[in-house]
Amino acid sequence: MAKRADTLAGSLELLILKTLARAPNHGFGIALHIEDASDGLLLLEEGSLYPALHRLEREKLISGSWQTTENARRAKVYKLTEAGSERLREIEKQWTGTARGVQKVLSFA
Amino acid sequence: MKRLLRWLRQRLLPQEDWREEMESHLAMRQEWSERVNGASKGAASSDAHRRFGSRVRAMESLREQYWAHAVQDFVQDIRYALRGWRRQPAVVLAVSGTLVLGIGSATGIFSIVDPLLFRPLPYPHGEQLASVGFMGPVDTHEFMFGNFYLNWKRDQTAFSAMTAMRPSTQCEVVTNQTMQTPCTRVEWNFLRTLGTPPAMGRDFTPAEDRPNAPLSVLISYRFWQSAFGGQRDALGQVLEVDGHKARVIGILSRNFTMPQLGDLDLLLPAQIDPVAARAPGATVFLRAFARLKPGVTFEQARQRIWPLFRQSLKEVPAELRSEVHLMVQSLRDRQIQEAKKASWLLLAAVMLLLAMACVNVINLLLARSEARREEFAMRTALGAGRGRLLRQALTESLLFALPGGVVGVGTAALLVWALKQQATAGFLRLESVQINTRVFLFALAASVLCALLTGLLPALTHLRAQALRGWRTVAGGRNWFRHSLIALQIAFSLLLSTGAILFMSTLIHLESEATGFRPEQLVAATVNASRTPYSTNEKLAAFHNELERRLREIPGTRRFAMSDSIPPAGGVHVRPVSNILVANHQRVAENGGLAAFRYVTPGYFGTMGIALRSGRDFRESERTGTESSIVLSDLLAKKLFPNENPLGQSVALEGAGSPWLTVIGVAANVKNNGLETPESPEYYRVRMKTGMQLGHSDTAVFRTHLTTAQLERWVARQVAAIDPAATVKMAVLAETLRTLNDRPRFLAMVMGVFAAASLLLAGVGLFGVISYLVTSRTRELGVRAALGATRKNLVVLVQSRIMGWVALGMAVGMLGVLGMQRLVSSLLFGVSAADPRPLLAAVGTMMIVAALASWYPSLRAARVDPALSLRTE
């Protein structure tokens, strides 16, 4: 069942940071990766990426720069910063902990 | 310039970047769709947009991360509002006009009452300063005598400092010229207690306050400028003050004011001799001021002084004790005595008026936003949040109100100017009114408050409607809000109208109050010869007799008399009634009150127009030899001789051993205690040629056809011939009486204006609401008409909807009036606080206004054409 990513408000940050941890990317690329990596389980409203991206950029967790892509198109490409990978580690730990806890409750007989 | 702005905008809100980013995202998605899924251009494009979601929402989210977006929104709101205004100039004019008048008059009244009620006194911690003393029939303000003052100062525990001043007088000062200036003698710690040291030089020392010490003097800023040209070498110079040499030791600061608000140029040490002040019979008359200890309230201070007061009271003659009270009041209260209640009243009334103006504006804006319902619905559908719409409503309200505030300050200045032209506003001390920062702040606060009320309320009631439900013509439950506002307006208007009627009847009663004498054509000349020391009683007697002889000769005058004081003022002298011995009768009880008395010439009663109830006037023959006759006032005669004829009876005025006087006449009562308080008992003694009874001043009364100017010239000439240093002051009795009524006249006028304005506002509001009712229910009325309702039925239908609220408003207003009456009763005269007639009159007026206001809209309701109305859907 496809979930809209804006109901997982805080987790959007997590997804973005994780995506960028693999490699720098632009907004479209991030959306594509999330869709791909989640096997279509997560379908974002792609517009909602941009407020999140800018918020992360202002908090200096990622840094963006305008570049020209292969198709001679201008796109803003984001890269994870030191502080960003710190934050990623923290959120990831929190998230997996929560997820495991929820899973345990659900499977409690 | 444009480039600078664009650069700035880009830095603060990089919207271009975002747009580009999002465009590029969409383009990439579209490409990917075409390439990977083989979709057509159109399908790929719509797919990309669908996946992206609302670009507008994304932009909004992005914008809200930056504070500058609020500024941009604000500017946008302003332009939006102005566009809307251009389409509806009538409403805009009505709203602005109402707000300008409301805020303007509120600001004006505030600027007037602020110096009286709120503005801090020009002394550090001025709220701790108190005026202390005895309140008694001797004077209008509290006072002290030297011996009591010295005792209290020594023994008191309520104050951190206590100081005193002697009443201000005129001194003769010689610098390089001779002139008369106001000067006051004060204790050495006077300025210290007030907390206002001299701006230059130094303050007095205790040594300089000792009797016979060499005189030092502090001069005012004004005197420093005029007499010394503002030169620093003024310090240390020696002046001659009333014949004594005085050295200038300091210069007072520019805005120094005396606590009793008197005029001042010179400050000298009082040099009270403690021994002399305590001698029996000494009367060193003082005004005392003090500074409360921190944390002590006025009430607590009063309780701490009370034992000292009771101790002092023992030295007051027994028959006077009940007339004397302890007064410990704040300096502000002392300064604003007559104006205090009136100021609060004016402020309350104008705030009511402002509230009514805001209510009218709310109604206007409500009607307007009803009409813009579809517009709001559209904007909500396009993504505007409730917060956004609210902000826009608020911005528009601010646009209405802030100019209102600015113009309001101008209106305030105009109002103050207009009132200054009004002589009757004198009691408000308009000279101290300034249009200053505080006034601006008040105007700003009033504007913002009005904007909040008039912006938020309509917007909030409308946003509750769901977005696109806006096409119904009947607004159901929302109307109760507007109708309750009307009820509120009716209540306020009733309050103001009743108040106005109460004050107007007070004025009428005061003006028709019998004074006991006939003031027409009466002019009084008061001669003051205190400059000249008449060293012996004979010299003084000669002065008075010569004065009388000369003034009696005046041409063109029908009647002439002299007295040491004239009504409506009280007597210069008072005596406890219980002191008066009546032959073969019991004394009057000790708390029988005080009787005033005057020394008059024969012909006084005829000149003043005071009727003689029985007996006769004094004769010239009774003025030589021993004093043998007395005339009583009606009130006194009834007190002393309740059941018998006073004529021919004997009284002794100063108790046992004093000469017996025969009562030769009883005069009608005369107002001698102000117009609003009952008159005191009074008696008249004839002026003996020996002149021993009189002081340094005297009053001549003329019933004359001459103009005051002519009379003054003539009198001055005669007086100068006897004593060139004496001063003459003229008073026209009719005017004196009129100025006594200044405050009631002013209040009646202003409250009348407020009441009229409130009735207008209420009427306009009612008119608006009923009109709206008719318009919004046109279809319903049409249906009813088609089904057979008569015109009368329709009118009744419309009216009945609203009259319930009007009645509620009246009821609330009546409750308010009952509550208010107790508060204003001290300002009224001749009409009791509980009198229902003013209220009924106000209710009647209100009903007439309501009828007028509803007449036209009801007519329109009656004329509804069913066919036409059913078509407007």
Image (cartoon, coloured by chain):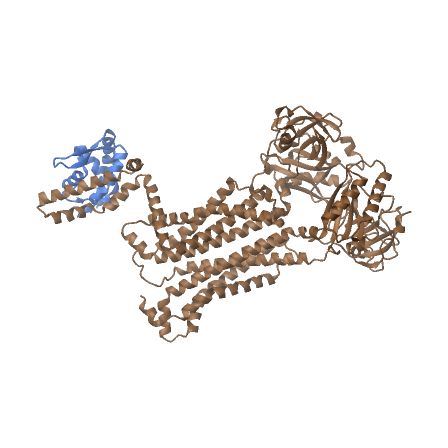
Chain colours: A blue, B brown
Q: Quadrant of residue B232?
A: top right
Vertical order, B865 against B87 (above or below): below
Vertical order, B872 against B80 (above or below): below
Where residue B290 sits in the image (x, y, percent)?
Answer: 65, 36
Where residue B18 sits in the image (x, y, percent)?
Answer: 23, 39
Q: Quadrant of residue A42?
A: top left
Q: Is residue B295 left or right of residue B793?
A: right
Q: Report whether residue B728 is seen.
A: yes
Where residue A65 sits in the image (x, y, percent)?
Answer: 21, 32
Q: Is residue B380 left or right of residue B125?
A: left
Q: Residue furthest right?
A: B625
Which of the image's four quarters has the N terminus of chain B? top left
Where residue B833 sits in the image (x, y, percent)?
Answer: 62, 57
Residue at screen point 31% across, 61% down: B471
Q: Is residue B855 left or right of residue B870?
A: right
Residue B97 versus residue B503: which sits nearer the camera?
Answer: B97
Vertical order, B772 against B187 (above or below): below
Residue A49 versus residue B94: which sits nearer the camera?
Answer: B94
